[in-house]
Amino acid sequence: MGSTSDVVFLSGLDLFGSVVDRMPSSAWSEASPCEGSTALDVLGHLGSAIGFGVAILEGRAHEWPTFDRPADLVVGAPADYWAAVAGP
């Protein structure tokens, strides 16, 4: 029997969280494999997309935040931001 979608999703959050936890603070401003984006942009983009998806699944209204760059969505330390996105 395969994994359920919630198990796969939560495992993905944990895996990405382990990457976030290992990132040195100086690396967040480095270029990512996504052209024109930094590592912090990727974190902000992923966090906002997850927030949007969770709101839909919970039946809540959600609007995309206004920002110049996805990195602007990351408030505080990147690991703390991710912990808030990924939940306990």
Image: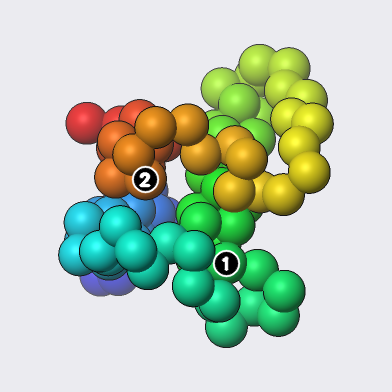
Left or right side of 79 for 56: right
Q: Is residue 22 above or below residue 67?
A: below
Q: Which residue is mark 1?
A: 38
- Front position in the image: 29 or 4: 29
Residue 63 is tagged as: none
Q: Quadrant of residue 33?
A: bottom right
Left or right side of 52 for 40: left
Task: Kindly state the secondary structure of the residue where label 2 is placed.
Answer: helix
> Does the residue at mark 2 contact the one at mark 1 (Cβ under 8 Å)?
no
Residue type at mark 2: give it: Pro
Task: Kindly state the secondary structure of the residue where label 1 is placed.
Answer: loop
- Front position in the image: 70 or 13: 70
Residue type at mark 1: give it: Thr
Q: Which residue is mark 2?
A: 78
- Front position in the image: 51 or 75: 75
Locate the N terminus by quadrant. Answer: bottom left
At horizontal 47% and vertical 31% (from top left) the residue drawn is 75
At horizontal 43% and vertical 62% (from top left) the residue drawn is 28
Locate the C terminus by quadrant. Answer: top left
Q: Position of residue 86 (x, y in %)?
A: 35, 39
- Front position in the image: 30 or 21: 30
Left or right side of 20 for 64: right
3D distance between C-alphas at marks 2 and 1: 13 Å
Q: Position of residue 77 (x, y in %)?
A: 34, 39
Q: Position of residue 12 (x, y in %)?
A: 35, 61
Q: Position of residue 47 (x, y in %)?
A: 52, 44
